[in-house]
Image (spheres, rainbow, N blue to C red):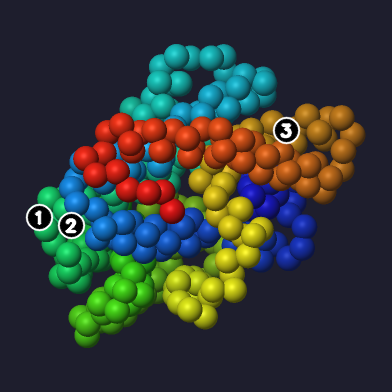
């Protein structure tokens, strides 16, 4: 949030620009965590149907609420008038596939997240592959080949459908899950080394879309991803039990709706606050509080109630929500 509310808005970030600018790489941490969690979920799921229902119930109700919030923010921001086509395209979670700009720039990562879900469901549940080392190695080698030999324009459809730019990050999460569940073999550690070695090329966003590359050196990026890897390992081990304190558990509970609503609506809130005479620092503080409150409202009022109902209604074998 601090990155978006400073670097992404109209005033400079407080503190050292280099440190604040690293907020753009928070999505890398998210993809590593996703690889860990989704692979663990797949291992505990019986069928593609149950997996699809669980993921839809987890993601879509909150997302639809966030789209309504983002559309409302757009109407309040003196931007383009309401267009039903844009709203409907955004409601699919992947507006870029329809040539429509996202109402909130945070939505871009959802395409790659959904790509990963499909790949995990097809190979782990559809084909019954519960040892991912060989498939992940092929995935990484394809991503490496594409990055080294092919042009970006020719690969856009493939990139969009295979999560290729972030394959190594999802793979790191999968490997950490294997280590956590004591299923790691020698090939698992080799796979981890391969995934980490791909960070020497620098940020995926810098290569594929020409952004963020100037914020960090390739060696610095490799060190950052290594740090993220160590942090996820630590948090998932017995050494990280002390992190399960109430404030962090609360933020974890509302993290998904917070990710969805904080940016577009936050920019509108800060604009109004600064027009009303608030200093940038005060506007940022108030906006953070408003974003957390909105995320909590969506989580408590929509996300978890809808998740329980959808799972109970459509899953073949309903599972309790942790």
Residue carrying label 1: 127
Q: Residue 285 or 3: which is nearer the viewer?
A: 285
Residue carrying label 3: 269
For label 3, count other residues whose C-alpha is less than 10 Å away and answer few (under 14), some (14-19) or many (20+).
Answer: many
Mark 1 and mark 3: Cα distance apart in space: 48 Å
Q: Earlier in the sequence, mark 1 or mark 3?
A: 1
Q: Residue 209 or 177: which is nearer the viewer?
A: 177
- Picture mark count: 3
Dot in front, 1 or 3:
1
Mark 2, secondary structure of its residue: helix
> Is 23 displayed left or right of 223 in the figure?
right
Farthest right residue in view? 277
**Residue 289 vertical placement versus 174 (above, below):** above
Pointers 1 and 2 in contact (C-beta within 8 Å)? yes
**Residue 192 vertical placement versus 171 (above, below):** below
Coordinates of residue 29 in the picture (x, y in percent): 48, 62
Coordinates of residue 21 in the picture (x, y in percent): 63, 59
> Is 232 displayed left or right of 279 in the figure?
left
Q: Earlier in the sequence, mark 2 or mark 3?
A: 2
For label 2, count other residues whose C-alpha is less than 10 Å away and answer few (under 14), some (14-19) or many (20+).
Answer: many
């Amino acid at each position: 949030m601090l990155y978006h509310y400073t670097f992404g808005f109209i005033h400079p970030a407080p503190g050292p620009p280099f440190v604040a600018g690293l907020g753009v790489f928070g999505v890398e941490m998210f993809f590593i965590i996703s690889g860990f969690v989704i692979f663990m979920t797949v291992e505990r799921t019986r069928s593609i149907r149950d997996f699809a229902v669980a993921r839809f119930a987890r993601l879509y109700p909150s997302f639809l609420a966030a789209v309504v919030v983002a559309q409302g923010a757009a109407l309040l921001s003196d931007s383009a008038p309401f267009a039903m086509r844009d709203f409907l395209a955004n409601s699919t979670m992947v507006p870029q596939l329809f040539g429509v700009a996202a109402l909130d720039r945070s939505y871009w990562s959802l395409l790659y997240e959904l790509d990963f879900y499909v790949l995990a469901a097809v190979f782990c549940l559809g084909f019954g592959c519960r040892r991912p080392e060989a498939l992940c190695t092929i995935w990484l080698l394809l991503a490496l080949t594409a990055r080294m030999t092919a042009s970006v324009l020719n690969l856009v459809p493939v990139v969009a459908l295979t999560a290729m730019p972030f394959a190594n990050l999802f793979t790191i999460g999968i490997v950490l899950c294997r280590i956590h569940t004591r299923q790691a073999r020698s090939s698992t550690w080799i796979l981890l080394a391969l995934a980490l070695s791909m960070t020497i090329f620098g940020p995926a966003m810098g290569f594929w879309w020409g952004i963020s590359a100037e914020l960090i050196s390739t060696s610095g990026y490799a060190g950052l991803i290594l740090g993220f890897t160590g942090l996820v390992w630590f948090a998932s081990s017995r050494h990280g039990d002390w992190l399960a304190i109430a404030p962090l558990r609360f933020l974890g509970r509302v993290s998904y709706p917070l990710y969805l609503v904080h940016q577009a609506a936050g920019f509108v809130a800060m604009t109004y606050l600064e027009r009303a005479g608030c200093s940038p620092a005060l506007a940022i503080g108030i906006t953070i509080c408003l974003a957390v409150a909105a995320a909590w409202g969506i989580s408590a009022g929509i996300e978890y109630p809808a998740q329980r109902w959808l799972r109970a209604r459509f899953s073949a074998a309903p599972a309790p929500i942790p």
